[in-house]
Amino acid sequence: IALAKELFGEHYRDRIKELNASDERGINVVREKIKNYAQESINLTQTKNLNLPPWKIIILDEADNMTSESQYALRRIMEECSKITRFCIICNYHHRIIDPIVSRCALFRFKPIPKLELKNQLKLISKKEKLKCSISVINKISDYSRGDLRKAINFLQRCYNCFGDGISSMIIDEISGIVEESKLKKFINDCILNKEKDVLEFLNYVYTSGYSLVNQILVLHNLVLENKKFTSEDKASIIILLANIDQNLIKGCDELIQLYRLAYFIINRKKSNLKNCVQNN
């Protein structure tokens, strides 16, 4: 929308059509609403007089939720109306967009916002809202947000609404839904030392306390890299497993089963490595 405003100025409302995730975007909507708008002609006199681009824009937000039938119908419209209509397709996972559409588009990947920019923005908000927020709290919020500025601002607002100026690192940990780092360290060490009883107690604690495994992935990743008891091969294999677990959680797999899988893998990693060596030989 910001780009459209820059391109079309005060006439941008006449030149863009936005469909977000809340709109129905089945094949009928693509064939009717999107097709009709894409085929509409443009006022060429206005275009020449005001020096505007000779086309309009259709913005499809979260397009990865569209069905494959809708996407194939959209591909045809993109081909037929390319002279007077351009498409801006926004998605989280571009692999869910069919190849014929991807091949017709220029692909732009937006990286997470750098931590320094996140911290500066949180400091600015704290100053304007007259919120006394320590540097350690801002650092922790920026770490947990992982480059997502919207998440960081919502985090800061939630903390302020609940605790006012009394925000501490402990409160951030509690609200974030991340298990205490000391407990995660103990869990990994218990797995290394094959303390099955302690491992099962931790798994039960995480499950009954309502913690989400999704929030623990990054912390576990960092703890595995820092742990000196793991060999380089162990670290590589565990991190690959964490990536697979993260992917499975996105697809909706059971979190407890995935956590059991991680614990079992770490406990049996030596046996697995030995088995692989025997098979390779």
Image (spheres, rainbow, N blue to C red):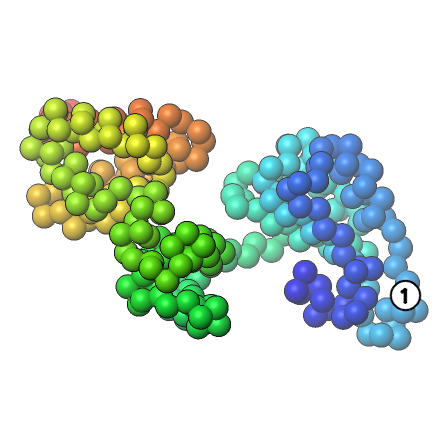
Left or right: 46 in relation to 103: right
- The x and y percentages for residue 181 are 21, 46
Location of the C terminus by quadrant is top left
- The x and y percentages for residue 43 are 90, 63
Residue 36 visible, this orientation: yes
Which of the 4 image quadrants contains residue 279?
top left
- The x and y percentages for residue 241 are 28, 35
Q: Which residue is mark 1?
A: 44
Which residue appears at 81% of the width and 41% of the height? 33
- The x and y percentages for residue 176 are 35, 47
Q: Residues within 10 Å of mark 1 (few under 14, many from 20)?
A: some
Q: Is residue 13 above or below residue 262?
A: below
Location of the N terminus by quadrant is bottom right
Label 1: state its secondary structure. Answer: helix
Q: Which of these two is toward me, 122 or 148?
A: 122
Q: Is residue 228 above or below residue 16?
A: above
Which residue appears at 7% of the width and 33% of the height? 193
Q: Which of these two is toward me, 279 or 31?
A: 31
Left or right: 5 in relation to 94: right
Which residue appears at 16% of the width and 36% of the height? 187
Residue type indicated by callout 1 = Leu
Q: Which of these two is toward me, 90 or 136?
A: 136
